[in-house]
Amino acid sequence: MGNQLVSKAPSQIFPVEHYMTDIGDLEFETNLGSTRFFKVALAREKNDHFVVLKVFTIQDLSLNLNDHRIRVLELKRLLGGAFHCLPFVRATLSERMAFLVRPYIKYSLYDRLSTRPFLKNKEKLWLAFQLLLAIQQAHKHGVVHGDIKSENVLLTGCNWLFLSDFASYKPTFLPKDNPADFSYFFDTSRRRTCYVAPERFKSRSQVGKEANQKDPSLEPLLPDTFSDGELLPSMDIFSAGCCLIELFTDGSIPFTFSQLLAYQSSEYSPQSVIDKINDESIKKLTLHMIQADPIQRNSANQYLSEEKSHLFPTYFYSFLQSYMQLFSSEYKMTPDQKIGRLSLDIDHIIKMKETNVDDFDGEGLILITSLVTSNMRSLGFADSKLLALSILVKLATHLPEDIVLDRVIPYIIDSLTDFSSSVRISAIDSLTKSLSKINCLDPSEGNIFPDYILPALAPLCSDRIVLVRTALAKNIADIALESVRFLDMVMVSGEDDPDRPISSYEAEISDLHNCLSHMVSVLLSDVDNLVKQTLMEYSVKKLSLFFGKLKGT
C-alpha cells in the first residue's frame, strides 16, 4: 500500500512555505528539512502552539490518498489515551498536496545523545523504560508503529518520552535487492541507519513476481505484493532494540541497510557495537530484542514485567512514571504551576530517597532535577523562581557532585541576571549553599571559579539595587573560601593523573585573589553604608583568611 506513494518526479520544486498558502490557520516559522517523500516545516497555530507540518506533494492525480488519511485519523482516535504516543492530529488532502500535523517537540533521542549535559545511566534507563511503555501502549490499542528509530523518539526537557510519526502510510515489506524504496520511505534523515526488522525485506522470488518495468517518466513502482501485509508487534520490538543499542552506546549505529541484509542471512553480527554497552543486563535485553527470528522476540509488556526490580528499578513503576505524567503536557499545567506543585512534593520525594522507598536513590533525584530545571526559564512570576531556587538547594544536598555542577549551578548562575532583585538575591544565597555541598571535584572543573562563577558574580557588585549588593557582601567571603577549597580538591585529585598538566598552586591562588580583590574593593567603596557594614560584619574575618595576613590588611 505504501509503495503507491512513490509518485512522478515533480516538474518544478517549491519550498515548503509555498504550499502553506493552502493552510490558512498555520503560520510558517522555519524549514525543518526536505526529502523526496516529505517537506517538513515548523509552524505556529493561532493559539501560539508550535506544530510540525509534513507535506506530501501530489504529482500523480491518480494516487488514492484518502485511505491513508482515514487510517491516520483512526490512529489518532486509537492512541488518544496513550500518554507516551504522539500521533498526527490532522491529516488533510487538497488538489496539490496532502499534509500531516503533530505537536512540536524540540529534541529527538538522536539529538539528545549529542547534547550537553550528556545523559547519565539512570536517565538512559528511564528513557528505555518509557520507550517500551510507549510500544506497550500502542500495541495494546492494536497499533504497530512501523518505523521506530531515534529520530522518531521525542524527548521533552524533563526527559518525558513520546513515540511519534506512526508510519501507517509506509510499506510493510521492502525489496532486499533494491535500496531505492528503503531510502525513499525510511532513510529520510540520510544517516544510512536501518532499524527496519529483517523479516520485512523480501526478494522478488519470495513474492513470486518480477518487478514492473520502469517507465522513464515514473519512479520505480513495485508490485503491490511487496507492500501488502500486516505490520506485527515483533517488528517494532526489533526496531526498539536498535534504538536502545544506540542509546546505551551514546550514538553507535547497530545496522546500516547492507548490514541488516547480511544479518538476515547470518553473515553479520552487531556484537562489536553491543559490546560497547557496559551493563550485562542491557546487553542481554538488546540482544533478545533484535533476534533475527521474530518468534523469539518477546512483547514490550513481557520485557517490562521481566525487568521490573532487575534492570528497571521498582520506583519507575510505582512512583516515577505516574508522577512525571502529571507534568508531561505544557497545556495541562503552566511552568509556574509545575514548580508550585513540585515545591509541595519535594520534601516527601527527598524523604523517599532517605528511606530508600522502592530503591529510590540519589540518581533518581536526577530525574526530578531535570523536571525543575526544564521549567525554570519559562517561569513568569518571581515567586515561582524563588521556589525553584529553593528546590534546587534542597536537591543539591542529595545529588551526586557532578550533577550539582552540571545541572544545578548553571541554572542558579542564570538566575543572577534575572530582572527581579529578589530572585538575584536568592540566587546568590543558593549559589553559596550549593557550592558548599560539593566535596569531590573532577580536575576538568578546576577553572570553574575564575572562568565561570566569579565573572558571573562580578556585575552584581554594581547592581542598581542596594539589597542585591548587600547579599553579595554577606556571601562573598564564603564564596572566596569555597574557591580555595575547590582549588585544593583539584590539586589533590590531579596528583593521581600523571598525564594532567601540572599547574602552580601559587599561580592559581593568585588568580583567585586578583578576581576577588577587585570585587571586594568595589563593595568597600559602595555609596551605601549598609553594603559596607554587611561586608565588615559577615565577611571581613573570613576574607582575611582568604587573602592572608599581608593582603588582608
Image (cartoon, helix red, strand yellow):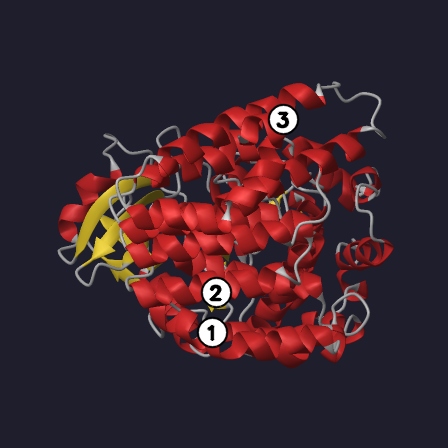
Q: Residue 547, image x and y in percent?
A: 58, 31
Residue at 13% over, 56% down: 24
For badge 2, the amino acid type reads: Ser
User: Is label 1 in a helix, a strand or a loop?
Assistant: helix
Give the Cα separation between the discs numbered 1 and 3. 39 Å
The answer to which quarter of the image holds residue 169 is bottom left
The answer to whether any part of residue 384 appears in the image is yes
Circle 3 is placed at which residue position?
A: 509
Mark 1, mark 3: which one is toward the viewer? Answer: 3
Give the Cα separation between the discs numbered 3 and 2. 31 Å
41 or 224: which is nearer to us? 41
Give the Cα separation between the discs numbered 2 and 1. 8 Å
Q: Residue 357, image x and y in percent?
A: 73, 79
Drawn side of residue 347 relative to residue 425, left or right: right
The answer to which quarter of the image holds residue 457 is top left
Disc 2 to disc 1: CB gap under 8 Å:
yes
Q: Residue 261, image x and y in percent?
A: 72, 40
Residue at 37% over, 62% down: 385
Comes first in the chain, label 3 or label 2? 2
Comes first in the chain, label 2 or label 1? 1
Mark 3, mark 2: which one is toward the viewer? Answer: 3
Comes first in the chain, label 1 or label 3? 1
Q: Which mark is residue 343?
A: 1
User: Is label 2 in a helix, a strand or a loop?
Assistant: helix
Q: Which mark is residue 271?
A: none
For badge 1, the amino acid type reads: Ser
User: Is label 3 in a helix, a strand or a loop?
Assistant: helix
328 or 74: which is nearer to us? 328
Circle 2 is placed at which residue position?
A: 390
